[in-house]
Amino acid sequence: MISPRCSDPGSVAAGGLKIGDRKFISIGGIPGECLRGRKGAAGCCVKKTNTAMVIGIYDEGVQGGDCNVIVENLGDYLIGQNI
C-alpha cells in the first residue's frame, strides 16, 4: 500500500517502492504529494490526489524528469477537478 507513505517519503527508503511485480529504490519525493523510485534505467513516479493515485512507470530511453512532470501535472489537474 502506497498512500499512507506519501506523507513521509523517507519511510519508503528501507523497503523500497513496489508496483505490481517491480520493485524500485526510493529516491525521494514531495511529502504529502508524490513518491519517486528508480531501478537501473527504469523508474516510477506516484502522485496522490484527493481520491486517486496517478502512477507513471518508465523504462530505458525515457528521462525520469519527463515522467515526473507528466504524472505531477496530471495529478495537479485531477486535484483541481476535486478528483
Image (cartoon, grey):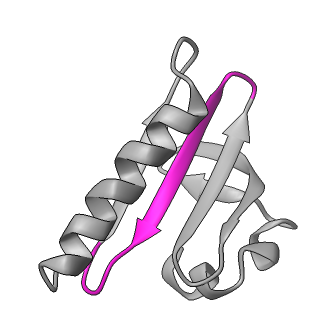
Q: Decide which of 15, 3 is in the foreground and name it.
A: 3
Q: Does the image show residue 79?
A: yes
Residue visible at 68% across and 22% down in the picture: 41
Q: Residue at x 83, y 65 (%)?
A: 13
Instruction: Give coordinates of residue 50: x percent, y percent.
Output: 29, 86
**Residue positioned 81% across, 75% down in the render:** 10
**x, y percent for residue 58:** 49, 30
* Above or below, comparing residue 19 to residue 13 in the picture: above
**Per the image, is 76 magenta?**
no
Residue 32, how many percent across, how many down? 56, 84
Name the image quarter holding residue 70.
top left
The percent position of residue 8, horizontal first and vertical second, equals: 71, 84
| 41 inside magenta stretch | yes
Identify whether 4 is placed above or below 29.
below
| Camera-nearest residue between 16 and 9 | 9
Between 80 and 12, the one nearer to me in the picture:
80
Q: Is residue 76 above or below residue 37?
A: below
The furthest residue to the left: 81
Start-end of magenta stretch: 40-52
How many marks do you count on the picture? 0
Placement of 50 over or under 71, stated as above or below: below
Quadrant (top left, top right, bottom left, bottom right) of the C terminus: bottom left
Residue displayed at 50% across by 46% down: 68
Q: Is residue 1 visible?
A: no
Q: Quadrant of residue 42?
A: top right
